[in-house]
Image: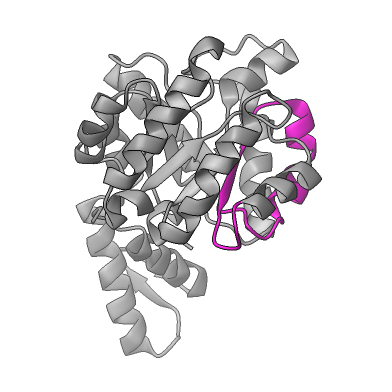
Amino acid sequence: MSCTLQHARSLLFVPATRLERLGKAFDAGADAVIVDLEDAVAPDSKDMARAALAERLPQLDSAQRARLLVRINAVGTPWHEADLALLSPWFGQGLGAVMLPKSEDPLALRSVAGRLQPAGRVVPLIESLAGLDQTDALAREPQVLRLAFGHLDFQLDLGMRCTPEEPELAFARNALVAASRRARLPAPIDGVTTDTGNAERLLADTTRARAFGFGGKLCIHPAQVAGVNQAFSPSAAELDWARRVLALADQHGGQAFSLDGRMVDLPVIRSAEAMLRAAPVTPT
């Protein structure tokens, strides 16, 4: 399983019709890159986009393939089977994962995973109430890497008109985080911020995602990557605090102690350990 994708903070979309952008996407600092065969590609361009991806995949090195996901077309669409046929052999050559849109049916997800060889990993994209209702079952499928939230399509499915801070979606975000935890998956991936030129909105959205327990965020512009990576990474002060906690914990032999006026016991020590594990990942 790809550690790069398990803990990716920023996942940057590139339309499969614009693969000339792929090199810049890998260089933009994103932990992962998602080639999109679905929403970003018009129906009459699907076959051309898939052919372009087939031509480009052999040009990627092993490190790039490990950081790559491909969002395929949904189960039941005319392009789904051809997408799987293209990608299946690449899981024997280090391709990271596929993202499965409109994930709602655990049996359909299992069928997709079975086509991708045992090494194939799937990121189910939860975009509907039906998908949310099946989140626990989807998360427990053995080849699922982590969950992702397609919050824009989710709002459309339920006829929602969310306010900018999206408190209306708290129930869904809580459900994805809880299902990930129950299935012992890495923290899920939150949806995109559509206002690509608004750094304040991006920071607010990413800070909210981290507060809910998400571990990453989908990006639609390279300018979003640095802000997402920073918001999902512990600050220098937080890392310094975590190191001091663990150093003093060793000295106190498991007993509770005080640091900076705060009692430190086992849950705080576990929090410090988690913070150090979440230190920035440098793509290779």
User: Where, by quadrant of the figure, is residue 279 drawn?
Assistant: bottom left
The chosen color scheme is one colour
The answer to which of 48 and 22 lies nearer the viewer is 48
Q: Quadrant of residue 280?
A: bottom left
User: Residue 59 location, x and y as percent?
Assistant: 27, 44
Quadrant, the C terminus: bottom left
Is 120 above or below relative to 107? below
Q: Is residue 175 magenta?
A: no
Identify which residue, 210 or 75, lies in the foreground: 75
Image point (79%, 30%), residue name: 130
Residue at left offset 25%, top offset 40% = 26
Q: Is 63 on the left or on the right of 129, as rendered?
A: left
**Hey, which quadrant is residue 11 in on the image?**
top left
Magenta span of residues: 116-145
Comparing 136 with 87, the one in front is: 87
**Which residue: 78% across, 39% down?**
105
Q: Is residue 94 visible?
A: yes
Tell me residue 182's x, y (percent): 69, 58
Total label count?
A: 0
Image location (x, y in percent) of residue 274: 42, 64
Residue shown at the point (67%, 46%) measured from the top left: 112
| Residue 207 visible within the image | no
**265 to 76, vertically: above or below:** below
| Residue 87 x/y as whole percent | 51, 44
Whether residue 188 is situated above or below residue 162 in the rendered picture: below
Asked if residue 28 lies left or right of residue 217, the reply is left
Is residue 56 shown above or below 144?
Answer: above
